[in-house]
Amino acid sequence: MTVMIPTWVGGDLVAVEKLEAHRRGLRHKAISVFVMHGKEVLIQRRALGKYHTPGLWANTCCTHPHWGEEAMACAERRLDEELGLTGLPLQFRDRVEYRADVGGGLIEHELVDIFVAEVATQVAPRPNPDEVMDTAWIPLDELAARTRATPEQFTPWLRIYLEKHAKQIFA
């Protein structure tokens, strides 16, 4: 299935095929979600079949909105598609931009709407094996320490969020 995502080309926002946006390193829209229970965050390990960063740990979920899709609707859709989670109380936290080499000649240059869902009890995800190979609840400070100690186990964007945007996301 060809997925067209909102991408800036020559100053105009246009629909570009997702893989092409990554090959060319074009700036495009994205969302990231962090599900929190107190100071613990739900993280996922990306499935080995993913076309970039397979097997690496990432935040709860992240993706690109489809052309014409609102960011909140996208966040809700991906929580369900990746983790089988629905009805979580998502709150918009901030919009950040980053650029990162994700390997294989691909670049993520994203303008990301970040959402946080604070839950009263640890939710039990039902991971889609095509998307997610594992999940874990981990204290945020431990996650930050692990990303510094073993960065090769974590996606570039998760490391960037924790290193440069933690106050905006987790305040």
Image (cartoon, grey):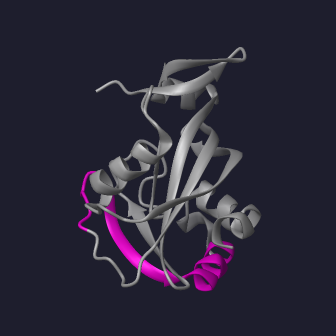
Foreground residue among 151 and 21 = 21
Assign the N terminus to one quadrant of the image: top left
Res 136 quadrant in image? bottom left
Res 104 quadrant in image? top right
Relative to 137, is 25 on the left or the right?
right
Q: Is residue 68 above or below residue 101?
A: above
Magenta-drawn stretch contains 143: yes
Q: Position of residue 19 (x, y in %)?
A: 47, 29
Relative to 156, is 16 on the left or the right?
left
Q: Is residue 24 above or below residue 47?
A: above
Q: Can residue 131 be seen in the rendering of this structure?
A: no
Magenta-drawn stretch contains 117: no
Foreground residue among 74 and 101 = 74
Q: Which residues are magenta?
A: 126-149
The residue sitting at 55% across, 64% down in the picture is: 154
Q: Position of residue 3 (x, y in %)?
A: 38, 27
The residue sitting at 62% across, 56% down in the picture is: 156
Foreground residue among 86 and 151 = 86
The residue sitting at 23% across, 67% down in the picture is: 126
Relative to 122, is 41 on the left or the right?
right
Q: Position of residue 103 (x, y in %)?
A: 57, 44
